[in-house]
Image (tube, grey):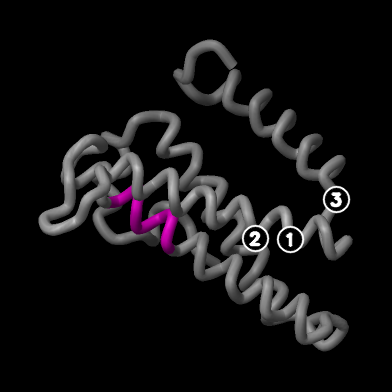
Amino acid sequence: MLTESALPHTHLLCALPAGIKDVLSQLITIWNVLIAMNLDKKEVDMNSQEREVMNILSEECAEVIQAISKCHRFGIDNYKPGKPKTNREHLEEELGDLYAMIEILQEMDVISWTNIEQAAKAKREKLKKWSTIENL
């Protein structure tokens, strides 16, 4: 199971802006669910289309984590040498890719928007209690 403390440069996570830290935390949760699904015998219940979407979703989670890391290491509005996009724009692109895969899972009736919205509300309540993020 992946945890924030298992990530390289864990000491740098403390310096992340709260919003980025929250996205990273949610991605770790998604990653752990995907890993658990792969370890569980229920994977055989997925058809090849569902399996492909889940695999791409996990790849997109990793790409979002990498984009967050670049924002933290080099600055959110800095450009990667030789690239036309800022780290913020790259993060937005990767989040869009992730969102597309989530939409596809919902369209395939693998996940439910209702359940996702309930989980998002619960997460906001936890953040109100345990984070310093304002205006939740």
Three-letter residue code for mark 2: Met
Kindly report the distance in space between the C-alpha atoms of the residues bearing marks 2 and 1: 5 Å
Q: Is residue 46 above or below residue 31?
A: below
Quadrant in the picture for residue 104: bottom right
Determine crowd level at label 2: few under 14, some 14-19, many 20+ residues with C-alpha closer than 10 A: some
Q: Earlier in the sequence, mark 3 or mark 1?
A: 1
**Where residue 89 sits: x, y (%)?**
35, 43
State the mark number for residue 101: 2
Q: Which residue is mark 3?
A: 112
**Where residue 45 sits: x, y (%)?**
87, 83
Residue drawn at point x = 80 percent, y = 35 percent: 118
Q: Specify the segment rendered in magenta.
A: 63-69
> Judging from the image, what secondary structure is the residue with disc 1 in?
helix
Residue drawn at point x = 44 percent, y = 31 percent: 19
Residue drawn at point x = 60 percent, y = 66 percent: 57
Q: Which residue is mark 1?
A: 104
Does residue 34 show up magenta in the picture?
Answer: no
Q: Quadrant of the C terminus?
A: top right
Kindly report the distance in space between the C-alpha atoms of the residues bearing marks 3 and 2: 13 Å
Three-letter residue code for mark 1: Ile
Q: Quadrant of the N terminus?
A: bottom right
Discs 3/1, front: 1
Q: Are marks 2 and 1 in contact (CB under 8 Å)?
A: yes
Determine crowd level at label 3: few under 14, some 14-19, many 20+ residues with C-alpha closer than 10 A: some
> Judging from the image, what secondary structure is the residue with disc 2 in?
helix
Q: Residue furthest top?
A: 135
**Where residue 54 sits: x, y (%)?**
67, 72
**Most common secondary structure along the magenta stretch:** helix
Determine crowd level at label 1: few under 14, some 14-19, many 20+ residues with C-alpha closer than 10 A: some
